[in-house]
Image (tube, rainbow, N blue to C red):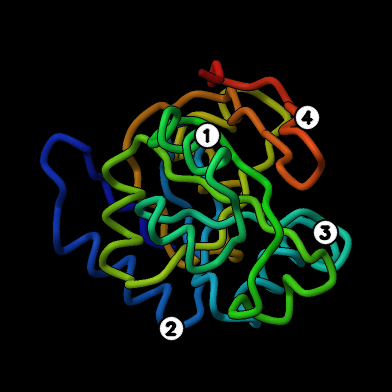
Amino acid sequence: MKLLKIIEESLNERYIDIAVEALLDGNIIIYPTDTLYALGCDALNNGAIEKICRIKGVKSEKTNLSIICESISQVAEYAHFDNDEFRMMKANLPGPFTFIFPAMSKLPKAFKGRKTVGVRVPDDKIAIELVHRLGRPIMTSSIEYEDEDYGTEPELIAERYVGDVSLILDSGRRSIVPSTIIDCTGDEPEIVREGKGVLK
């Protein structure tokens, strides 16, 4: 496993390229977001998605899967939303929010059992640059931890996930407060988890 130190203020393009190559090869990486560190893979690679589900001990058809996009326009390629939901996203993104929408058919088989997809556009330059260079979304899932240090310190995160991921983009200590989740599949948007963001 590689531990590559990177900061938002001066993105190391070589490290971003190494991470993108790992994603293209079907590998799993750990990378920073505006909330927690997250496990990530190419969102259009069904085998890689199943790897993350195995790492977390869940079944893809029985868990909510989320993707990170670089913009709302990219979200529109993978999820259905109406004008009111568009305005809500525009008012709150980029930011620490996950919006759950009906999934579009271009997402891989791992998403089909759920018929929904969580979408994020985080306020984090590293995460957004990864998606931009990859050219498509990253399937994302927060790391798991039992002790706060193992959720925020990259060196300790590496201990937990050695053998499971190919590299970690180390951007220093991060938050352990998750994103706020808004379910937009019903008649009205519903906050199903209060997290870091305060919805406008």
Q: CA distance from mark 4 to mark 2?
A: 34 Å
Labels 4 and 3: the sequence-earlier one:
3
Up-down: is 80 above or below 136? above
Q: Is residue 149 left or right of residue 51?
A: left
Q: Residues within 10 Å of mark 2 (few under 14, many from 20)?
A: few
Residue 192 tag number: 4
Q: In the rendered structure, which amino acid carries the disc numbered 1? A: Leu
**Label 1: which residue?**
36
Labels 4 and 1: the sequence-earlier one:
1
Residue 151: % across, % down = 58, 32
**Label 2: which residue?**
25
Q: How many marks?
A: 4
Residue at the (64%, 51%) spot, across then down: 118
Q: Nearer the viewer, residue 88 or 45?
A: 88
Residue at the (56%, 50%) spot, across then down: 119
**Where is residue 180, by image quadrant?**
top right
Q: Is residue 170 left or right of residue 116?
A: left
Q: In the rendered structure, which amino acid carries the disc numbered 2? A: Asp
Q: Is residue 175 left or right of residue 17?
A: right
Residue 126: % across, % down = 29, 47
Residue 57 tag number: 3
> Which circle, 4 or 3, is nearer the viewer?
4
Q: CA distance from mark 1 to mark 2?
A: 24 Å
